[in-house]
Amino acid sequence: MKIEKIIIRRGKGDFLRIPGVCLMSKVRFDDQGLPFREYHIDPAQIETIIEGYEKHAKYLNDYIKKLSRMLEEKRPDQSEMKNQIETGNRFGGGYGD
């Protein structure tokens, strides 16, 4: 059986964005008169959709690694923090300073 089109239905105001793919959409109304958006995707674009999401996932993964490295660089050494807490110098000294 050949797939003519793939239809994805989203609620009112809920847009669908797929990297690298231009979507055709129509606003329809359900049995209760509530609007929804119906997206039609050409099955020939499925590979493009998958590639787009793989690239996006790789970008997000690289970005998360970059943020993790930045966080590690800015995190103070644990022994230094313990020393500051014990001596009361972490927040500028104790009472009466």
Image (cartoon, rainbow, N blue to C red):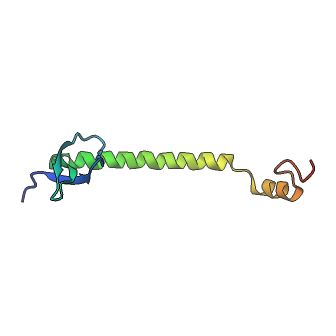
Q: How many marks?
A: 0
Q: Is residue 25 above or below residue 80?
A: above
Q: Residue at x 86, y 59 (%)?
A: 86
Q: Is residue 21 above or below residue 68?
A: above
Is 1 on the left-hand or right-hand side of 42? Answer: left
Closest to the observer, 78 or 30: 30
Image location of residue 64, percent across then percent down: 51, 49
Q: Quadrant of the N terminus?
A: bottom left
Q: Residue at x 84, y 54 (%)?
A: 84
Q: Among all residues in the image, which is located at the extreme left? A: 1
Closest to the observer, 10 or 33: 33
Q: Among all residues in the image, which is located at the extreme front? A: 33
Image location of residue 22, percent across then percent down: 23, 39
Is 83 on the left-hand or right-hand side of 56? Answer: right
Image location of residue 38, percent across then percent down: 19, 49
Image location of residue 15, percent across then percent down: 29, 46
Q: Residue at x 56, y 46 (%)?
A: 67
Q: Residue at x 7, y 56 (%)?
A: 2
Is 63 on the left-hand or right-hand side of 45? Answer: right
